[in-house]
Amino acid sequence: MKKRFKLTDLDCANCAAKMEAAIKKIDGVNDAAVSFMAQKMTIDADDGRFDDIMKEVVAVCRKVEPDCIINL
């Protein structure tokens, strides 16, 4: 399943790159893209575990950029 999410308060391209790299390491994630310019995130992950994977994505993103909000 592939979904796009709008991001709020993503402050820099470096943070976006760190978030993308961390998300790609999560088990069940096939691909991920985080765009600082567009303030969007695309996640491609296993259908059956998508909600659990998104909880991990939110936690990982909070560590990198505490102010960033993922509009689920």
Image (cartoon, grey):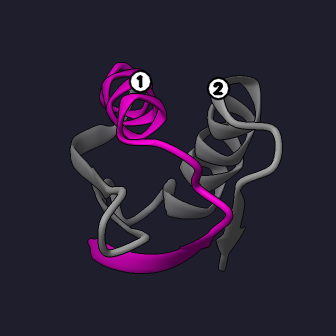
> Which residue is drawn at the image coordinates 67% and 79% (left, top)?
71
Q: Which residue type does callout 1 highlight?
A: Lys
Q: Secondary structure at mark 1?
A: helix
Segment colored magenta: 1-25
Sequence-first disc among 2 and 1: 1
Residue furthest to the left: 31
> Which residue is drawn at the image coordinates 51% and 54% (left, top)?
49
* Residue 36: x %, y % from top left: 36, 57
* Residue 56: x %, y % from top left: 65, 38
Residue 40 is inside the magenta segment: no
Quadrant hosting residue 35: bottom left
Quadrant in which the N terminus is drawn: bottom left
Compare residues 56 and 14 and report the one nearer the observer: 14
Task: Find residue 64 and name its label.
Answer: 2
* Residue 38: x %, y % from top left: 31, 75
* Residue 12: x %, y % from top left: 47, 42
> Which residue is drawn at the image coordinates 59% and 54% (left, top)?
54
Residue 42 lies left or right of residue 59; in this view the side is left
Instruction: Work out whether 38 lies above or below 44.
Output: below
Residue 8 is inside the magenta segment: yes
Q: Which residue type does callout 2 highlight?
A: Val
Task: Find residue 18 and name its label.
Answer: 1
Compare residues 35 and 71 and report the one nearer the observer: 35
Compare residues 48 and 21 and report the one nearer the observer: 21
The local crowd at label 2, few if under 14, some if 14 to 19, many if 20 or more residues have their Cα within 10 Å, is some
